[in-house]
Amino acid sequence: MTVGEIVSVSGVGQSTVSHHLKILAEVRFVLVERQGTSSLYRINEACVSCFPTAADVVMGKPVPASPACDRTGDRDGT
């Protein structure tokens, strides 16, 4: 999605969305694909796959054995 699309569906201001996306992109939670003068943002699926385990840890539940989450995500710039 573009920043404008995210603003439209979230009801949050453009500067706030841009600021948060910048931070999320720095830690690679979202991945950015440049298309001309536009930037498309998408969630890094490697991060999302870690959520159930992270939630279990926070809630004090036993963590099931699973593959380690890739903190680096995609390195191809998309």
Image (cartoon, rainbow, N blue to C red):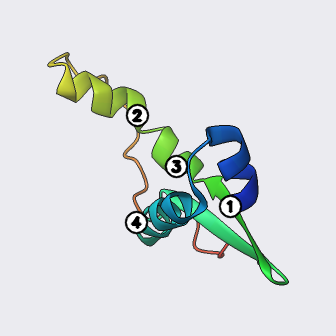
Marked residue nearer the N-terminal end (1 or 4) = 1
Circles 3, 1 touching at the beta carbon (< 8 Å): no
Q: Do callouts 4 and 3 mark residues in contact (Cβ within 8 Å)?
A: no
Q: Secondary structure at mark 3?
A: helix
Report the disc number at residue 46. 3
Please give the label number shown on residue 60: none
Q: Quadrant of the N terminus?
A: bottom right
Residue that label 4 marks: 27
The structure residue drawn at horizontal position 54% and vertical position 58%, both measured from the top left corner, is: 17
Q: Nearer the viewer, mark 4 or mark 3?
A: 4
Asked whether residue 1 is in view, the answer is: no
Q: Residue at x 39, y 27 (%)?
A: 52
Residue 43 coordinates in the image, percent (x, y): 60, 51
- Tell me how far mark 3 sits from mark 1, CA to CA: 22 Å
Nearer the observer: mark 3 or 1; the answer is: 1
Of label 2 and label 3, which has the lower sequence position?
3
The residue type indicated by label 2 comes to Phe
**With respect to residue 49, does 39 lie above or below?**
below
Q: Earlier in the sequence, mark 2 or mark 1?
A: 1
User: Could you tell me how far apart the alpha carbons at marks 4 and 3 are, in whole angstroms?
Assistant: 12 Å
Kind of residue indicated by mark 4: Val
Write down the residue under mark 2. 51
> Please, what secondary structure does the residue beneath circle 4 have?
loop
At x 40%, y 66%, the residue is 27
Of the residues shown, which amino acid type is indicated by label 3? Ala
Sequence order check, earlier mark of 4 and 3: 4
**Quadrant housing the C terminus:** bottom right
Query: Are the two marked residues, 2 and 3, in contact with CB atoms closer than 8 angstroms?
Result: no
Are there few (<14), some (14-19), or many (20+) residues within 10 Å of tag 1?
some
In the rendered image, the residue lying farthest to the top is: 61
